[in-house]
Image (tube, rainbow, N blue to C red):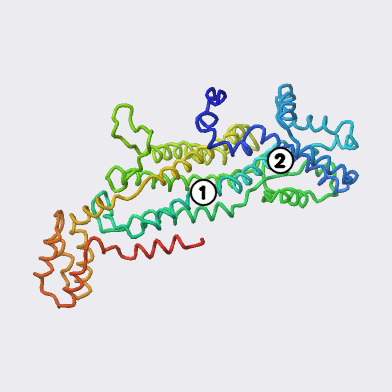
Amino acid sequence: MSDALHALSPLDGRYAESTAPLTEFFSEFAFLRDRVRVELNFLPALSKTGLFRLLTDSELAHLESIQTNFSTADAEAILAHERKTRHDVKAIEYFIQEKLQGTTLQDLVPWIHFGLTSEDTNSLGQAIALKESRDKIILPALNNLIAALSEFAILHRSVAMLARTHGQFAVPTTLGKEFAVSVARLKKIRAEIATFRFEAKLTGAVGNFNALQAAAPHIDWVSFSEKFVSSFDLEPNLLTTQILPYDNWVRYLDLIRLTNSVLIDLAQDVWRYISDGYLKQQVVAGEVGSSTMPQKVNPIDFENAEGNLGVANSLFTHYAQKLIISRLQRDLTDSTVRRTFGTALGHCLIAWSSFQRGMKRIVPDVEKLTAELNAHWEVISEGAQTILRAAGQPDAYESLKEQTRGLILTEADYKAWVESIAVSDKVRAQLAVLSPYSYIGLAIELTDRIIDSKK
């Protein structure tokens, strides 16, 4: 707790519990560990080309143990090298050299980082972090949020309410269906996130395999690169400069940004529904809504979510603007930016968690919704004029416009109008059964359709 109180970033302080899972993938320790993993995996792959001897099972196990037992002390040893080299990947190379000295693998020291450039190691390490965090943290968190929204949508799929278009009263909808719209949007994005393939590179200093080809022209380095990158379940990109073109990573992060934008849209609507009294918030004993106004129950979870979604999206926007641009074959401006991926995703986790917490505390104020429906019978004029048009009345729209535009109709007003117009008994019966409570179209069926969908 003391460390959290003194943390510079709220991600490591106030919100540390929410963001802690991401440290496994985006902390400095994780980045060092994953690059050590790449470099150690490179040695047995290289041995299979015939450049040097094949490794024994015990030697392979030793390389594996360096990865699996990678510790804070190991990370600190690398940082000690970096303070001298001012080069993080060269520091990793020196660390591995030390680990192999005095073992049967010490003859492999000259082959560590052989023919590679730093960005071969870095792109693989960070692609691994993006992929594994997607699978273990991002997708489960998004699944939980979609499930919470789906549960709310199904529970309230038949709760009728006035819709608002242009901020004005419009035809009725249902509360559940409006949440189902967001569920449908999120499900589509989630499907793209789940199947996304992350790219990485192993192509050398300017992307042409120069060093590897010069040292061993008899080896098919293109095939080697494809096989090695694919061994991490990543997509090899063979046409690069010194750095991986980050278009692919930006597409993935843009999917997260799109997810957040959908949630900002919903958070603002929920905030308005609470403000207008459509939704009530659960009162929790001991909580305080205002330091001076004791009656307040504020929508703080949705406000917190909206704020953190905005912070995350500002970073995602910067990635899209920055990472696809590099001066000539490489500059270093991307490196420090890529180290903030965990920050952007951390704000996502805070927001998604806050949103779920808020969802547990809201319920519709059915009495309020019903009273508002009952006060605005003019909203069913759409249905009335459409029934009249289907019956062949050419001035149906114009006549209803004359009766309703800018006016408020009561139930008595509407029923008096139905009795006054010259229509068949069949059409009059169709008009008579219309009401703001029942004029909800296929809202219930549409909600069931998207929530039951496995897509």
Using the image, determine if residue 191 lies above or below residue 104.
below
Query: Which x, y percent locates residue 84?
Result: 73, 21
In the picture of the structure, the residue carrying the numbered disc 2 is 120
- Residue furthest left in the image: 420
Lower sequence index among marks 1 and 2:
2
Using the image, determine if residue 393 lies above or below residue 194.
below
Mark pair 1, 2: CA separation: 31 Å
Q: Nearer the viewer, residue 447 or 100?
A: 447
Helix, strand or loop under label 1: helix
Q: Nearer the viewer, residue 130 or 318?
A: 130
Quarter of the image for residue 356 reads top left
Query: Which x, y percent locates residue 393?
Result: 17, 73
Q: Amino acid at mark 2?
A: Asp
In the picture of the structure, the residue carrying the numbered disc 1 is 142
Residue displayed at 35% across by 40% down? 283
Q: Is residue 382 left or right of residue 12?
A: left
Q: Is residue 235 left or right of residue 294?
A: right
Residue displayed at 20% across by 72% down? 430
Quarter of the image for residue 291 reads top left
- Residue furthest front in the image: 285
At label 2, counting other C-alpha atoms closer than 10 Å, the crowd grade (few under 14, some 14-19, many 20 or more) is many
Q: Amino acid at mark 1?
A: Leu
Query: Which x, y percent locates residue 406?
Result: 15, 53
